Image (cartoon, grey):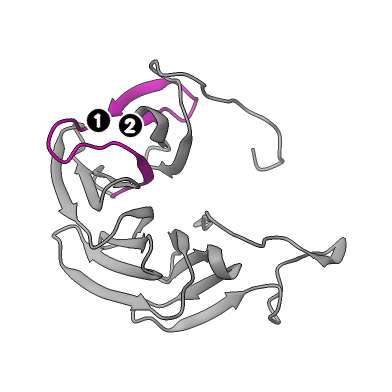
Amino acid sequence: DANGQFIASFGPGSGGGELLLPEGLAVDAQNNLYVADSGNGRVVEFSSGGRFLREFRRSGTFALTNPSGVAVTKDGRVVVTDASNAVLHVFGPDGSHVNALFLSAPARGVALTADDVAILALEGTNQVQLLSLGARVENTFGGIFNAPVGVAVDPSGDFWVADTGSGRVGRFTRAGGNVATFTSGSPNAAVDPADPDRKIFTSPQQLAVDCR
């Protein structure tokens, strides 16, 4: 909880309510928790109290094999990246698979803007892409990242990137402007106050923004 007290854990395993190699997390408007259960090739939904609710799968053509990132739209659609395929999966609020959007490279992290544009960190390209759920590319940013993985969106509409290879976390506008960069070598140094010589992160991979 907010005080650092342990509440509950999930898994391991492959049954309902169990997890194997979980990666991305998301929370919907009802405070239900969605987990990209990469080892089981699915996304699992839990209630805010930890009760297993359902799972999302896609087999056959354009199967969901290695889910890594997950986000939820305001109307309840579940958006999932697949680290093994250059596909962005979209599931409807009823759990049905409604679309598969093809990407130029696999993506691990995904976040959604208020108007449901997906922020994607594309593997092997050093790029972050903004893609509407209608498959329109709004923008692609490169040349400033080194193996980005995690992404998040804040209440102002800016997006944040955990740039793993450079050891930085950056904040950007949707037009690509760099609002702030947090790294051990900048004025916004990410260091441990109790030990200023120790970096808090060296290879950041995931991040989240407190929107309260």
Label 1 near label 2: C-beta < 8 Å?
yes
Q: Residues within 10 Å of mark 1 (few under 14, many from 20)?
A: some
Disc 1, SS: loop
Residue 41's tag is 2
Q: Is residue 34 magenta?
A: no
Can residue 34 be seen here? The reply is no
Separation of residues labelled 2 and 1 (CA atoms): 7 Å
Q: Is residue 68 magenta?
A: yes
Q: Quadrant of residue 165?
A: bottom right
User: In this rendering, is residue 193 above or below 17?
Assistant: below
Residue 11 image point, x, y percent: 51, 22
Q: Residue at x 50, y 73 (%)?
A: 171
Residue 57's tag is 1
The residue furthest right is 194
Residue 3 image point, x, y percent: 71, 41
Residue 62 image point, x, y percent: 16, 41
Residue 98 image point, x, y percent: 12, 41
Q: Quadrant of residue 158?
A: bottom left
Kind of residue at badge 2? Gly
The residue furthest top is 15
Q: Which residues are magenta?
A: 44-73
State which quarter of the image contains the N terminus.
top right
